[in-house]
Amino acid sequence: MAEQSEEQAGKLRISEIFLSLQGEADAVGWPTVFVRLTGCPLRCDYCDTDYAFSGGTWWRIAAILAEVASYKVRHVCVTGGEPLAQKGCHELLSQLADAGYQVSLETSGAMDISLVDPRITRVMDLKTPLSGEAGRNRYENIGFLKPWDQVKLVIGDRNDYDWAVAVLRKYELDQRCSVLFSPIHGKIAPRELADWIIADRLPVRFQLQLHKLLWGDEPGR
């Protein structure tokens, strides 16, 4: 009940707010303010932000906006954890868009995206088998995707790849929005995934995590 009363008071639990380069998706390379919300109902085997599962600090939305403004860049990424696990996330996204930012939301395929402000770019991570959470995907979300949204599939082995290709084709994901195939850092050689994509002529974008190449596993980058 304590968390509900905090959210009703216009607060969100935040793990960190920081400035870096966007490492993924269509905004890759842009200086971006990351607002990392605390908490996630999933436990993916390859998660690299498990420090955001708990803890954090309660912030009022007005204070979050003031902190974002202090960095003086136009791109903002709301991430987690799983940001949509906090009800107040929707209000934060809308207020960021009202303030004129280019806003992206990094969310799993397990949360309902239908109520997200349509001005927000949704980067939805459909969970592959190696994550251990593929059974949590909400495939009805696919029907809510817009052309400016993106679907990300993080791939760790050939089974993940074959599964991702089957989902791509079954739901015609490339006809809805951009589709991103990304190797799990340290699990599969990026070149191996790239070769599979080329061999199959897939209508997807191969991506590496730019921040991993620049800063490795350093938190807050």
Image (tube, rainbow, N blue to C red):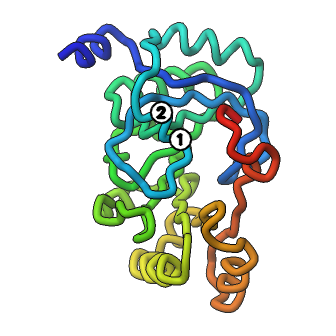
Name the residue nearer the viewer: 138 or 196: 196
Quadrant containing the C terminus in the rendered view: top right
Q: Is residue 35 above or below residue 211?
A: above
> Which amino acid is tagged 2?
Ala
In the rendering, which numbered label is found on residue 25?
none
Whole-number angstrom distance, CA of label 1 to CA of label 2: 6 Å
Residue displayed at 65% across by 63% down: 186
Q: Is residue 142 above or below residue 88?
A: below
Please report contact status of discs 1 and 2: CB closer than 8 Å, yes or no. Answer: yes
Residue displayed at 38% across by 62% down: 142
> Which amino acid is tagged 1?
Thr
Disc 2 is placed on an element classified as helix
- Residue 126: x and y in percent read 44, 61
Q: For residue 183, what is the image quadrant?
A: bottom right
Name the residue nearer the viewer: 6 or 57: 57
Q: Is residue 72 left or right of residue 24?
A: right
Q: Which residue is mark 2?
A: 52
- Residue 114: x and y in percent read 34, 46
Residue displayed at 39% across by 13% down: 11
Q: Dot 2: few (<14), some (14–19), or many (≥20) neighbours within 10 Å?
A: some
Q: Which residue is mark 1?
A: 49
Q: Residue furthest bottom?
A: 199
- Residue 137: x and y in percent read 33, 60
Name the residue nearer the viewer: 170 or 175: 170
Badge count: 2
Disc 1 is placed on an element classified as loop
Q: Dot 1: few (<14), some (14–19), or many (≥20) neighbours within 10 Å?
A: some
